Image (tube, coloured by chain):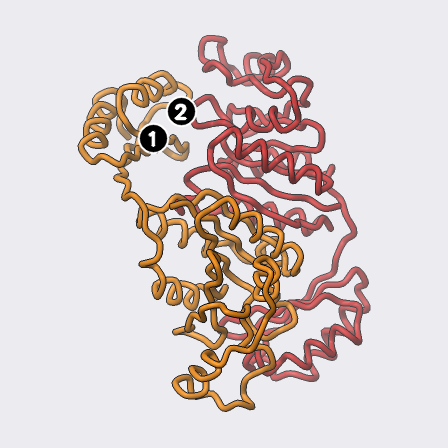
Chain colours: A red, B orange
Amino acid sequence: MEVALVCVGDELLAGDTVNTNAAWLGERLTERGVDVDRMTVVPDRVAEIARTVNEDRARHDAVVVTGGLGPTHDDRTMAGVAAAVGRSLAASDEVFERLTTEGGYANGDLADGTTHIPEGARPLHNPEGVAPGCVVENVYVLPGVPAEMEAMFETVAGEFEGERRHVGSVAVDEPESALVDRLATLQERFDVTVGSYPGEAVRVKLESADEAELEAALEWLRANVEEA
Amino acid sequence: MEVALVCVGDELLAGDTVNTNAAWLGERLTERGVDVDRMTVVPDRVAEIARTVNEDRARHDAVVVTGGLGPTHDDRTMAGVAAAVGRSLAASDEVFERLTTEGGYANGDLADGTTHIPEGARPLHNPEGVAPGCVVENVYVLPGVPAEMEAMFETVAGEFEGERRHVGSVAVDEPESALVDRLATLQERFDVTVGSYPGEAVRVKLESADEAELEAALEWLRANVEEA
């Protein structure tokens, strides 16, 4: 299963907010064996949201969209997603019901548009806030506030499932450039994918669908480098 | 001036690394009056890098690419950018010269490919590391290690320049949904763009090219909300 993330918000583009949502979702999806293939941050503009969601949903099994939900004028995500799937926005009776009965909101408390999701979409309840999310076609729409996004993602996490990958890494106390040949050998000999990430030490990360293969590769690597 | 960022790296997609580079560049470019319109994270694969850089450079004045530089097999950025602009990769004499004379590297220390950049590109010196960056057409290629990326960006920062924006914000102690009408009024009355970001308080952020207009809008806002 291959997934793309689309994060909506001018504040992410201006660097006012670090995109921890993308990292959190990347980690949770990868744990579930899903390949996260692309992450895009787009501004609070309907046309840009629609174009990006539209392209990504054609190329990937599913798209997870975060941010820009809510009743204020700069929350354009539902309109963008509706445009991407060629549907109108409509007030959802199910969302209204949930917010007024279980949520404890009176009708007058809810700002115009709070219950609007693309027509025919499956609403997702927001366990930590007001703004609902939804699933429409292969697009999952979640809020931008991290606690709300995380809680809502957990309600649909079971719908994301891929081949579990086994992961291990070795910290190496040699310059990255010195490792080139050994990393190439590693990739030839074992059925693993290899990444190297320089920092204080170079972290060499191995991944495989086969746990025994991963262990053998890690053992070979440890025997052939200077560990940090 | 409108810019897109492309960050390369499987570790960003898997959530192993939070994309602080994108936030840092977003902030520096916005300070310089440049609109950052799009940020994309792509895997360490030549075809994906090439497609994304190619699309973005057609739509924006410039593209800043970070990450995936260096000599190891998972560093595919130079090949991807070369493909995006239809050029070959070639060893750069200028880079070789700099690394061996000023950089203190002997020829044998440099892994194969270290000096390779797209043919005809302008090399960018890495003040904090080995891997060079480059500028080719309207594409700026910077390293992924934050200290290296930041130092290299500063050497070309003067090439990014737009209309300076004035920014101010007010922390509001009311629910975001209650602010809808007042934020709409604000946007009608003043020549400002308005964003609202819920957190412990709701942060309302205003931007304008005109400082007096921004100040007037901030004053009106403070007089009409419950400040946190």
Q: On the image, numbered disc 2 is attached to which residue?
A: B176
Q: Chain of mark 1?
A: B
Disc 1 from disc 2: Cα separation: 17 Å
The disc label shown at residue B193, or none: 1
- Lateral position of residue B34 relative to residue A209, left or right: left
Residue B175 in view here: yes
Residue type pointed to by label 1: Thr
Query: Seen in the image, is A78 located left or right of residue A185?
Result: left
Question: Element under label 2?
Answer: helix
Q: Nearer the viewer, residue A47 or B39?
A: A47
The residue located at (68%, 66%) in the rendering is: A168
* Rendered location of residue A145, percent (x, y): 49, 36
In the image, A110 versus A197, the foreground residue is A197
Q: Is residue B125 above or below residue A156?
A: below
How many C-alpha atoms fall within 10 Å of the one at disc 2: few (<14), some, or many (≥20)?
A: many
Q: Is residue A145 above or below residue A193?
A: above
